[in-house]
Image: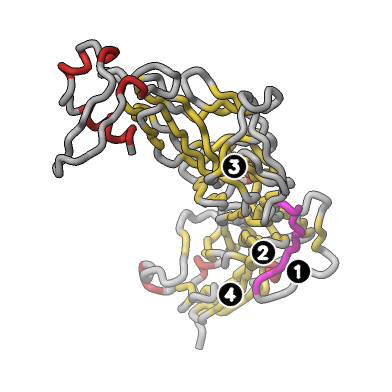
Amino acid sequence: MLRYLLKTLLQMNLFADSLAADVGNSSELLLLGLNGSLPALDLANLTSANGSRPRLEDFSPRIVEHPSDLIVSKGEPATLNCKAEGRPTPIIEWYKDGERAETDKEDPRSHRMLLPSGSLFFLRIVHGRRSKPDEGVYVCVARNYLGEAVSRNASLEVAILRDDFRQAPSDVVVAAGEPAVMECIPPRGHPEPTISWKKNSIRISDKDERITIRGGKLMMSNTRKSDAGMYVCVATNMVGERDSEPAELVVFERPTFIRRPINQVVLAEDSVDFHCEVQGDPVPTSRWRKEEGELPRGRAEIQNDNTLRISRVSAEDEGTYTCVAENSVGKSEASGSLSVHVPPQLVTRPRDQIVAQGRTVTFHCETKGNPPPAVFWQKEGSQILLFPSQPPQPMGRFSVSPSGEMTITEVQTADSGYYMCQAISVAGSILAKALLEVEDGEYL
């Protein structure tokens, strides 16, 4: 109580003049309170903690730099700052969780050192599963004979990062073009660890528009074959890094065609090849089919390079041939059509005929082929061509039917001679002759 009164009076400068005088010659000084009856104080015998007499310029401590919260790795050095002012210079002490913190002042072997500035320096942070001597809430206390000042609380936390991932990434299998997601949950840690990813030991950048890293997820849109590889989830905080067990991303490819079958036109009895080259992962299997029918038996052969070869083709082989490629992630098809050209053939050949003058005569000439051939007639030595559906010739005695028959009405002697039936198409041509003999004498 005496110190408090003296401190208050000194700070109010109420007795500046008296203290400036020779207090050594005064044995006592009566201090009057509000009631005028306080006992006298013996200033001659009042001293500070270091044995000196109180001085006007002395003042109680105040904290000018408070310690701040710290998160420190185990085994690393750390400093809790504290700076105080006061006169006489205050003594600094540290308290942890309400109890005096031991420093090198008390034990020279201590890993805690009290610096001249008043800060608390840790040579290394000691932290274990059972013993956590350095982790806690700290305050620094500055004291002199006029009083004490207490800093704000500062917590010292020890950063940790466990070894085991709570969820390691798993292998993922996707088809090229599909999205892929790999996920991990990092080890427990403080501060909470951040997540990054490595592919084949190289850090992945999310600058690629296809890649998004969010939380513990690595998301890839529109995967490519080049995305396949070994992926590792990396957890990082101030303690360091932890790598997960690797997980494989397998990017399969649906079958795609390197060489596709094409539409083809061939002559009958020739051979034809339909090519089909595919790629994919896994390696696709391939097979051939004919739409609305079966492959020609005994004449269709699939080569080692998956080429379909048809020998001695016929008109019945016409149609669409499809190559089917398939693997575990998909199926693809490609088709080519086959058109078979058959040269014109005579189904019915014209026969030599002898007719009487004035009669009507018909020469038959039935043909076939693919495409169907065009048929026309011509008299040997004449430049005149006779076609089906052709406008009537002079005198209107010659005509050719759509089926290829040539008819001559009112036969005359001058009509005698060889007549040629010709069939022509893109596949070839054929010709047949027939002799017409006209007997003299009119037809009765």
Q: Are marks 1 and 3 in contact (CB under 8 Å)?
A: no
Disc 1 and disc 2 in contact, CB within 8 angstroms: yes
Q: How far apart are marks 4 and 1 (CA)?
A: 41 Å
Left or right of 378 in this view: 389: left
Residue on which disc 3 sits: 135
Judge by depth and name the residue closer to the eye, 405 or 18: 18
Q: In this picture, which residue range is highlighted in magenta? A: 281-291
Kind of element beneath mark 4:
strand
Q: Label 4 crowding class (10 Å Cα cut-off): few <14, some 14-19, many 20+?
A: many
Gap in angstroms between the C-alphas marked 3 and 4? 120 Å
Identified by mark 1, the residue type is Leu
Residue located beneath label 1 in the image = 295
Is residue 45 rendered magenta in the image? no
- Mark 3 Cα shell of 10 Å, populated few (<14), some (14-19), many (≥20): some
Quadrant, the N terminus: top left
Front position among marks 4 and 2:
2
Residue at image position (46%, 66%) is: 387
> Which residue is at the front of the view, 120 or 277?
120
Q: How crowded is mark 2: few (under 14 residues within 10 Å), some or many (20 or more)?
A: many
Side (left or right) of 118 relative to 47 = right
Q: Which residue appears at 62% of the width and 70% of the height?
A: 367
Disc nearer the start of the sequence (4/1):
1
Q: Does the magenta stretch include residue 286?
A: yes
Question: Of the residues under marks 1 and 3, which one precedes in the sequence?
Answer: 3
The front one of 127 and 7 is 7
Q: Circles 2 and 3: CB distance less than 8 Å?
A: no
| Earlier sequence position, callout 4 versus callout 2 | 2
